Image (cartoon, grey):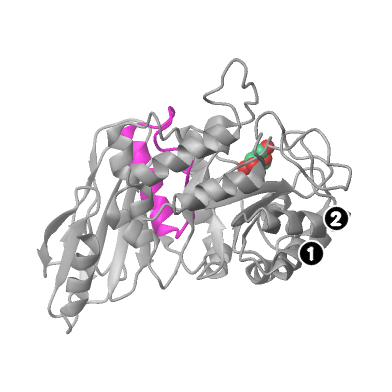
Amino acid sequence: MKTPPMGWLAWERFRCNTDCNNDPDNCISEALFKTMADKMAEDGWKDVGYQYVNMDDCWTAETRDSQGKIQPDPVRFPNGIKALADYVHSKGLKLGIYGDLGNLTCGGYVGTTIDKIVIDAQTFAIWEVDMLKFDGCNSNSIEKIIGYPKMSFALNATGRPIVYSCSWPAYEGGLPPHVNYTLLGNICNLWRNFDDIEDSWDKVLSIINWFGDHQNVLQPAAGPGQWNDPDMLVIGDYGLSYDQCKAQLALWAILAAPLFMSNDLRKISNEAKKLLQNKLLIFINQDHLGIQGTRIKKEQDMQVWKRSLSDLHYAVAFLNTANYGPPTTFTTNLFLLQIMHCRLGYNIYDVFTDELVGHYRADILSPCLHPHHSSIIIIIILAFDIAHYRIFETSQS
Ligand code: A2G
Protein backbone atom coordinates (compact mmCIF):
# COMPACT_ATOMS: atom_id res chain seq x y z
CA MET A 1 0.00 0.00 0.00
CA LYS A 2 2.69 2.45 -0.95
CA THR A 3 0.02 4.67 -2.44
CA PRO A 4 -3.63 4.82 -1.35
CA PRO A 5 -5.68 1.86 -2.61
CA MET A 6 -8.22 2.44 -5.38
CA GLY A 7 -11.25 0.41 -6.20
CA TRP A 8 -14.93 -0.12 -5.69
CA LEU A 9 -16.80 -0.95 -2.50
CA ALA A 10 -20.37 -2.18 -2.32
CA TRP A 11 -21.66 -0.64 0.90
CA GLU A 12 -22.91 2.89 0.30
CA ARG A 13 -24.69 2.08 -2.93
CA PHE A 14 -25.94 -1.48 -2.36
CA ARG A 15 -26.10 -1.69 1.44
CA CYS A 16 -27.60 -4.87 2.86
CA ASN A 17 -29.88 -5.70 -0.04
CA THR A 18 -30.18 -9.49 0.12
CA ASP A 19 -33.45 -9.78 -1.76
CA CYS A 20 -32.25 -11.63 -4.81
CA ASN A 21 -35.73 -12.90 -5.61
CA ASN A 22 -37.22 -9.48 -6.18
CA ASP A 23 -34.09 -7.50 -6.97
CA PRO A 24 -31.63 -9.92 -8.56
CA ASP A 25 -29.55 -7.23 -10.24
CA ASN A 26 -28.83 -5.26 -7.08
CA CYS A 27 -28.67 -7.78 -4.26
CA ILE A 28 -25.39 -8.64 -2.51
CA SER A 29 -24.38 -11.72 -4.48
CA GLU A 30 -21.53 -13.13 -6.50
CA ALA A 31 -23.34 -11.94 -9.63
CA LEU A 32 -23.12 -8.32 -8.46
CA PHE A 33 -19.38 -8.50 -7.76
CA LYS A 34 -18.68 -10.30 -11.03
CA THR A 35 -20.60 -7.66 -12.95
CA MET A 36 -18.71 -4.88 -11.21
CA ALA A 37 -15.42 -6.64 -11.97
CA ASP A 38 -16.46 -6.85 -15.64
CA LYS A 39 -17.22 -3.14 -15.68
CA MET A 40 -13.97 -2.25 -13.91
CA ALA A 41 -12.01 -4.15 -16.52
CA GLU A 42 -14.02 -3.04 -19.56
CA ASP A 43 -14.80 0.59 -18.93
CA GLY A 44 -11.39 2.05 -18.31
CA TRP A 45 -11.43 1.92 -14.50
CA LYS A 46 -8.66 -0.61 -14.22
CA ASP A 47 -6.56 1.31 -16.71
CA VAL A 48 -6.52 4.43 -14.53
CA GLY A 49 -5.74 2.51 -11.33
CA TYR A 50 -8.97 1.26 -9.76
CA GLN A 51 -8.02 -2.25 -8.78
CA TYR A 52 -9.98 -3.61 -5.81
CA VAL A 53 -13.51 -5.00 -6.05
CA ASN A 54 -14.62 -5.04 -2.44
CA MET A 55 -17.47 -6.81 -0.73
CA ASP A 56 -18.94 -5.33 2.43
CA ASP A 57 -21.44 -6.56 5.01
CA CYS A 58 -24.23 -9.12 4.53
CA TRP A 59 -22.37 -11.81 2.57
CA THR A 60 -22.22 -14.63 5.13
CA ALA A 61 -24.51 -17.59 5.65
CA GLU A 62 -26.56 -17.54 8.84
CA THR A 63 -24.02 -19.66 10.72
CA ARG A 64 -20.47 -20.99 10.50
CA ASP A 65 -20.00 -24.48 9.07
CA SER A 66 -19.57 -27.59 11.21
CA GLN A 67 -15.82 -26.93 11.53
CA GLY A 68 -16.35 -23.37 12.70
CA LYS A 69 -15.39 -21.77 9.39
CA ILE A 70 -17.13 -18.68 8.13
CA GLN A 71 -19.06 -19.36 4.93
CA PRO A 72 -20.92 -17.31 2.36
CA ASP A 73 -24.66 -17.38 1.88
CA PRO A 74 -25.13 -20.47 -0.31
CA VAL A 75 -27.90 -19.02 -2.43
CA ARG A 76 -26.29 -15.68 -3.16
CA PHE A 77 -22.74 -17.05 -3.49
CA PRO A 78 -23.39 -20.55 -4.93
CA ASN A 79 -19.80 -20.99 -6.13
CA GLY A 80 -18.14 -19.73 -2.97
CA ILE A 81 -15.65 -16.93 -2.40
CA LYS A 82 -12.63 -18.73 -3.87
CA ALA A 83 -14.38 -18.97 -7.24
CA LEU A 84 -15.31 -15.30 -7.01
CA ALA A 85 -11.70 -14.38 -6.23
CA ASP A 86 -10.56 -16.46 -9.21
CA TYR A 87 -12.98 -14.60 -11.44
CA VAL A 88 -11.91 -11.20 -10.18
CA HIS A 89 -8.24 -12.17 -10.59
CA SER A 90 -8.91 -13.36 -14.14
CA LYS A 91 -9.90 -9.77 -14.92
CA GLY A 92 -6.61 -8.48 -13.56
CA LEU A 93 -8.30 -7.14 -10.42
CA LYS A 94 -8.25 -7.90 -6.70
CA LEU A 95 -10.99 -8.99 -4.32
CA GLY A 96 -11.68 -7.45 -0.93
CA ILE A 97 -13.80 -9.03 1.79
CA TYR A 98 -15.46 -7.73 4.95
CA GLY A 99 -15.35 -9.01 8.50
CA ASP A 100 -16.35 -7.63 11.86
CA LEU A 101 -14.67 -7.98 15.23
CA GLY A 102 -17.61 -9.12 17.34
CA ASN A 103 -20.16 -11.89 17.39
CA LEU A 104 -22.29 -10.15 14.77
CA THR A 105 -21.50 -7.67 12.00
CA CYS A 106 -23.18 -4.27 11.99
CA GLY A 107 -25.83 -5.74 9.72
CA GLY A 108 -26.37 -8.75 12.01
CA TYR A 109 -24.38 -11.32 10.01
CA VAL A 110 -21.73 -13.73 11.29
CA GLY A 111 -18.88 -11.86 12.96
CA THR A 112 -15.37 -12.76 14.08
CA THR A 113 -14.96 -13.12 17.82
CA ILE A 114 -11.40 -13.08 19.15
CA ASP A 115 -11.19 -16.88 19.21
CA LYS A 116 -12.15 -17.00 15.51
CA ILE A 117 -9.60 -14.50 14.24
CA VAL A 118 -6.94 -16.98 13.22
CA ILE A 119 -9.29 -19.35 11.45
CA ASP A 120 -10.95 -16.47 9.57
CA ALA A 121 -7.61 -15.04 8.47
CA GLN A 122 -6.62 -18.47 7.21
CA THR A 123 -9.93 -18.93 5.44
CA PHE A 124 -9.59 -15.56 3.68
CA ALA A 125 -6.06 -16.49 2.60
CA ILE A 126 -7.17 -19.90 1.31
CA TRP A 127 -9.88 -18.15 -0.67
CA GLU A 128 -7.13 -15.89 -2.06
CA VAL A 129 -8.74 -12.61 -1.12
CA ASP A 130 -6.53 -9.54 -1.33
CA MET A 131 -7.99 -7.14 1.22
CA LEU A 132 -9.94 -7.26 4.46
CA LYS A 133 -12.06 -4.48 5.91
CA PHE A 134 -12.38 -5.35 9.59
CA ASP A 135 -15.36 -3.58 11.11
CA GLY A 136 -15.97 -3.04 14.81
CA CYS A 137 -19.65 -3.47 15.66
CA ASN A 138 -20.51 -5.60 18.70
CA SER A 139 -17.15 -5.60 20.41
CA ASN A 140 -16.01 -3.40 23.29
CA SER A 141 -12.86 -1.29 23.53
CA ILE A 142 -10.87 -3.97 25.32
CA GLU A 143 -11.75 -6.58 22.73
CA LYS A 144 -10.66 -4.15 20.03
CA ILE A 145 -7.29 -3.58 21.70
CA ILE A 146 -6.77 -7.33 21.53
CA GLY A 147 -8.54 -8.14 18.30
CA TYR A 148 -7.21 -5.60 15.79
CA PRO A 149 -3.51 -6.39 16.36
CA LYS A 150 -4.34 -10.09 16.53
CA MET A 151 -5.95 -10.00 13.09
CA SER A 152 -2.91 -8.15 11.74
CA PHE A 153 -0.60 -10.90 12.99
CA ALA A 154 -2.95 -13.61 11.78
CA LEU A 155 -3.11 -12.12 8.27
CA ASN A 156 0.68 -11.81 8.14
CA ALA A 157 1.05 -15.36 9.37
CA THR A 158 -0.89 -16.67 6.37
CA GLY A 159 1.95 -15.51 4.10
CA ARG A 160 -0.54 -14.02 1.65
CA PRO A 161 -0.36 -10.25 1.14
CA ILE A 162 -3.76 -9.04 2.32
CA VAL A 163 -4.40 -5.34 2.68
CA TYR A 164 -5.77 -4.65 6.15
CA SER A 165 -8.35 -1.91 6.57
CA CYS A 166 -9.24 -1.24 10.20
CA SER A 167 -12.48 0.43 11.26
CA TRP A 168 -11.19 0.59 14.84
CA PRO A 169 -10.57 4.37 15.23
CA ALA A 170 -14.07 5.21 13.98
CA TYR A 171 -15.44 3.35 17.02
CA GLU A 172 -13.21 5.23 19.47
CA GLY A 173 -13.92 8.79 18.36
CA GLY A 174 -11.01 8.94 15.93
CA LEU A 175 -8.69 10.91 18.23
CA PRO A 176 -6.07 10.38 20.92
CA PRO A 177 -5.94 9.38 23.71
CA HIS A 178 -8.52 6.76 22.70
CA VAL A 179 -6.87 6.20 19.32
CA ASN A 180 -3.18 5.38 19.00
CA TYR A 181 -2.16 6.30 15.46
CA THR A 182 1.37 5.03 15.91
CA LEU A 183 0.03 1.57 16.68
CA LEU A 184 -2.45 1.75 13.80
CA GLY A 185 0.36 2.62 11.41
CA ASN A 186 2.19 -0.50 12.53
CA ILE A 187 -0.68 -2.94 12.20
CA CYS A 188 -3.09 -1.60 9.55
CA ASN A 189 -2.68 -0.32 6.00
CA LEU A 190 -5.63 2.04 6.22
CA TRP A 191 -8.25 2.91 8.77
CA ARG A 192 -11.60 4.57 9.00
CA ASN A 193 -11.27 7.56 11.32
CA PHE A 194 -14.74 9.02 11.45
CA ASP A 195 -18.43 8.64 10.62
CA ASP A 196 -19.83 6.57 7.79
CA ILE A 197 -20.35 8.58 4.66
CA GLU A 198 -23.78 9.01 3.14
CA ASP A 199 -24.90 10.09 -0.27
CA SER A 200 -25.38 13.72 0.78
CA TRP A 201 -23.34 16.90 0.65
CA ASP A 202 -23.96 17.59 4.35
CA LYS A 203 -22.25 14.35 5.23
CA VAL A 204 -19.38 14.82 2.80
CA LEU A 205 -18.78 18.34 4.12
CA SER A 206 -18.91 17.23 7.75
CA ILE A 207 -16.19 14.68 6.97
CA ILE A 208 -14.07 17.29 5.17
CA ASN A 209 -14.45 19.67 8.12
CA TRP A 210 -13.61 16.98 10.67
CA PHE A 211 -10.44 16.10 8.76
CA GLY A 212 -9.48 19.78 8.63
CA ASP A 213 -10.28 20.40 12.30
CA HIS A 214 -8.12 17.45 13.43
CA GLN A 215 -5.38 17.58 10.84
CA ASN A 216 -2.63 18.10 13.41
CA VAL A 217 -3.30 14.59 14.67
CA LEU A 218 -4.31 12.97 11.39
CA GLN A 219 -1.79 14.35 8.92
CA PRO A 220 1.35 12.87 10.53
CA ALA A 221 -0.36 9.49 10.88
CA ALA A 222 -0.58 8.99 7.11
CA GLY A 223 2.12 8.01 4.67
CA PRO A 224 3.13 5.15 2.39
CA GLY A 225 1.66 1.94 3.80
CA GLN A 226 -0.69 3.69 6.23
CA TRP A 227 -3.62 5.85 5.20
CA ASN A 228 -6.42 7.76 6.86
CA ASP A 229 -9.69 6.79 5.22
CA PRO A 230 -12.48 9.40 5.05
CA ASP A 231 -14.72 6.69 3.53
CA MET A 232 -16.15 5.97 0.08
CA LEU A 233 -16.60 8.25 -2.91
CA VAL A 234 -20.30 8.77 -3.56
CA ILE A 235 -19.74 10.32 -6.97
CA GLY A 236 -22.09 8.83 -9.55
CA ASP A 237 -24.87 8.27 -7.00
CA TYR A 238 -27.89 10.45 -6.32
CA GLY A 239 -27.01 12.92 -3.60
CA LEU A 240 -24.30 15.23 -4.94
CA SER A 241 -24.48 17.89 -7.61
CA TYR A 242 -21.73 18.00 -10.21
CA ASP A 243 -19.87 20.73 -8.29
CA GLN A 244 -20.17 18.74 -5.07
CA CYS A 245 -18.76 15.68 -6.83
CA LYS A 246 -15.77 17.76 -7.86
CA ALA A 247 -15.36 18.95 -4.30
CA GLN A 248 -15.37 15.43 -2.89
CA LEU A 249 -12.80 14.22 -5.41
CA ALA A 250 -10.57 17.23 -4.97
CA LEU A 251 -10.48 16.82 -1.22
CA TRP A 252 -9.94 13.06 -1.37
CA ALA A 253 -6.99 13.67 -3.68
CA ILE A 254 -5.50 16.30 -1.38
CA LEU A 255 -6.07 14.06 1.66
CA ALA A 256 -4.21 11.13 0.06
CA ALA A 257 -7.38 9.17 0.74
CA PRO A 258 -8.15 5.66 -0.45
CA LEU A 259 -10.37 6.02 -3.52
CA PHE A 260 -13.17 3.49 -3.18
CA MET A 261 -16.15 4.36 -5.30
CA SER A 262 -19.52 3.11 -4.13
CA ASN A 263 -21.75 3.52 -7.14
CA ASP A 264 -23.38 1.49 -9.88
CA LEU A 265 -20.80 1.12 -12.62
CA ARG A 266 -23.53 -0.18 -14.96
CA LYS A 267 -25.47 3.07 -14.79
CA ILE A 268 -22.92 5.74 -14.02
CA SER A 269 -23.24 8.94 -16.06
CA ASN A 270 -20.48 9.92 -18.44
CA GLU A 271 -20.00 13.09 -16.45
CA ALA A 272 -19.32 11.21 -13.19
CA LYS A 273 -17.16 8.67 -14.97
CA LYS A 274 -15.05 11.38 -16.50
CA LEU A 275 -14.52 12.97 -13.10
CA LEU A 276 -13.59 9.70 -11.43
CA GLN A 277 -11.22 8.84 -14.24
CA ASN A 278 -9.51 12.25 -14.23
CA LYS A 279 -5.87 11.32 -14.55
CA LEU A 280 -4.54 14.48 -12.96
CA LEU A 281 -6.62 13.92 -9.86
CA ILE A 282 -5.45 10.34 -9.66
CA PHE A 283 -1.89 11.51 -10.23
CA ILE A 284 -2.26 13.82 -7.23
CA ASN A 285 -3.94 11.20 -5.07
CA GLN A 286 -1.30 8.62 -5.89
CA ASP A 287 1.76 10.82 -5.47
CA HIS A 288 4.47 8.53 -4.23
CA LEU A 289 5.63 10.73 -1.35
CA GLY A 290 2.27 10.04 0.23
CA ILE A 291 2.16 13.29 2.18
CA GLN A 292 -1.38 14.04 3.28
CA GLY A 293 -2.46 17.59 2.49
CA THR A 294 -3.82 20.07 4.98
CA ARG A 295 -6.28 22.90 5.18
CA ILE A 296 -4.15 26.01 5.17
CA LYS A 297 -6.95 28.54 5.33
CA LYS A 298 -10.54 28.69 6.46
CA GLU A 299 -12.21 32.04 6.18
CA GLN A 300 -15.99 32.18 6.38
CA ASP A 301 -17.16 29.92 3.56
CA MET A 302 -13.83 29.63 1.82
CA GLN A 303 -11.30 26.90 2.49
CA VAL A 304 -7.91 26.41 0.90
CA TRP A 305 -6.27 23.00 1.00
CA LYS A 306 -2.77 22.18 -0.11
CA ARG A 307 -0.77 19.04 -0.67
CA SER A 308 2.95 18.91 -1.39
CA LEU A 309 3.75 16.48 -4.15
CA SER A 310 6.97 15.08 -5.47
CA ASP A 311 9.18 16.95 -7.97
CA LEU A 312 8.19 20.41 -6.76
CA HIS A 313 4.54 20.03 -7.58
CA TYR A 314 1.79 21.24 -5.32
CA ALA A 315 -1.90 20.55 -5.46
CA VAL A 316 -4.12 23.32 -4.16
CA ALA A 317 -7.88 23.07 -3.76
CA PHE A 318 -10.14 26.03 -3.15
CA LEU A 319 -13.48 25.12 -1.65
CA ASN A 320 -16.50 27.36 -1.32
CA THR A 321 -18.80 25.80 1.27
CA ALA A 322 -21.55 28.42 1.05
CA ASN A 323 -25.04 26.97 0.68
CA TYR A 324 -26.21 29.74 -1.59
CA GLY A 325 -25.14 33.07 -3.01
CA PRO A 326 -23.30 34.21 -6.08
CA PRO A 327 -20.09 32.72 -7.40
CA THR A 328 -17.26 34.17 -5.36
CA THR A 329 -13.79 35.09 -6.46
CA PHE A 330 -11.06 34.27 -4.04
CA THR A 331 -7.81 36.12 -4.43
CA THR A 332 -4.60 34.75 -3.11
CA ASN A 333 -1.01 34.43 -4.05
CA LEU A 334 1.74 31.89 -3.87
CA PHE A 335 3.24 33.50 -0.81
CA LEU A 336 -0.01 33.11 1.11
CA LEU A 337 -0.20 29.53 -0.11
CA GLN A 338 3.22 29.04 1.48
CA ILE A 339 4.73 27.98 -1.81
CA MET A 340 8.31 29.03 -2.13
CA HIS A 341 9.19 31.46 -4.83
CA CYS A 342 11.15 30.47 -7.83
CA ARG A 343 12.83 32.81 -10.23
CA LEU A 344 11.75 30.79 -13.24
CA GLY A 345 8.10 30.99 -12.30
CA TYR A 346 5.25 28.57 -12.01
CA ASN A 347 3.05 26.54 -14.27
CA ILE A 348 -0.51 26.29 -13.10
CA TYR A 349 -2.85 23.57 -14.28
CA ASP A 350 -6.55 23.43 -13.73
CA VAL A 351 -7.13 19.82 -12.80
CA PHE A 352 -10.78 19.66 -13.76
CA THR A 353 -10.39 21.19 -17.19
CA ASP A 354 -7.02 19.47 -17.61
CA GLU A 355 -5.61 22.68 -18.97
CA LEU A 356 -2.47 24.61 -18.45
CA VAL A 357 -3.84 27.86 -17.05
CA GLY A 358 -0.58 29.55 -17.70
CA HIS A 359 2.93 30.29 -16.72
CA TYR A 360 3.05 32.72 -13.85
CA ARG A 361 5.59 35.03 -12.42
CA ALA A 362 3.21 37.54 -10.95
CA ASP A 363 1.72 35.67 -8.09
CA ILE A 364 -1.95 36.58 -8.00
CA LEU A 365 -4.41 33.70 -8.29
CA SER A 366 -8.13 34.36 -8.44
CA PRO A 367 -10.23 31.23 -8.81
CA CYS A 368 -13.96 31.89 -9.08
CA LEU A 369 -16.08 29.45 -7.09
CA HIS A 370 -19.78 28.63 -7.15
CA PRO A 371 -21.43 27.81 -3.84
CA HIS A 372 -20.73 24.17 -2.86
CA HIS A 373 -17.91 24.23 -5.28
CA SER A 374 -14.31 23.27 -5.39
CA SER A 375 -11.73 24.26 -7.89
CA ILE A 376 -8.49 22.39 -7.81
CA ILE A 377 -5.30 23.45 -9.39
CA ILE A 378 -1.93 21.90 -9.48
CA ILE A 379 0.97 24.23 -9.26
CA ILE A 380 4.24 23.15 -10.69
CA ILE A 381 7.25 25.11 -9.79
CA LEU A 382 9.65 25.27 -12.64
CA ALA A 383 12.78 24.60 -10.78
CA PHE A 384 16.11 24.42 -12.46
CA ASP A 385 15.40 21.09 -14.05
CA ILE A 386 12.56 21.38 -16.51
CA ALA A 387 12.61 17.60 -16.90
CA HIS A 388 10.27 17.35 -13.90
CA TYR A 389 7.62 19.03 -15.91
CA ARG A 390 8.12 16.65 -18.82
CA ILE A 391 7.76 13.63 -16.54
CA PHE A 392 4.47 15.03 -15.42
CA GLU A 393 3.27 15.46 -19.00
CA THR A 394 4.22 11.92 -19.92
CA SER A 395 2.25 10.54 -17.03
CA GLN A 396 -0.79 12.27 -18.47
CA SER A 397 -0.53 10.92 -21.93
O1 A2G B 1 -20.94 -1.13 8.94
C1 A2G B 1 -20.28 -0.02 9.56
O2 A2G B 1 -21.19 1.00 9.82
C2 A2G B 1 -19.13 0.42 8.65
N1 A2G B 1 -18.42 1.53 9.30
C3 A2G B 1 -19.70 0.77 7.30
O3 A2G B 1 -18.68 1.24 6.45
C4 A2G B 1 -20.34 -0.46 6.69
O4 A2G B 1 -19.37 -1.45 6.49
C5 A2G B 1 -21.44 -0.97 7.62
C6 A2G B 1 -21.99 -2.32 7.20
O5 A2G B 1 -22.96 -2.79 8.07
C7 A2G B 1 -17.12 1.45 9.56
O6 A2G B 1 -16.43 0.54 9.19
C8 A2G B 1 -16.54 2.55 10.40
Residue 369 position by quadrant: top left
Q: Residue 27 vs residue 344: left or right?
A: right
Q: Is residue 266 above or below residue 151?
A: above
Q: In percent of the image, x 48 and y 32: which residue is there?
A: 200
Instruction: Give me the disc on residue 363.
Output: none
The answer to whether mark 2 and mark 1 are in CB contact below 8 A is yes
Q: Amino acid at mark 1?
A: Lys
Q: Residue 87 vs residue 268: left or right?
A: right
Task: Examine the structure image and report whether residue 57 is included in the region drawn in magenta.
Answer: no
Looking at the rendered image, the quarter that the C terminus falls into is bottom left
- Distance, label 2 to label 1, CA atoms, is 8 Å
Say what secondary structure mark 1 lies in: helix
Which residue carries the number 1 mark? Answer: 150
Q: In percent of the image, x 76 and y 65: which residue is there?
A: 154
Q: Is residue 159 above or below residue 210?
A: below
Q: Amino acid at mark 2?
A: Ile
Classify the position of ligand 1 by quadrant: top left, top right, bottom left or bottom right: top right
**Upstream in sequence: badge 2 or badge 1:** 2
Instruction: Give me the disc on residue 114.
Output: 2
Q: Which residues are magenta?
A: 233-261
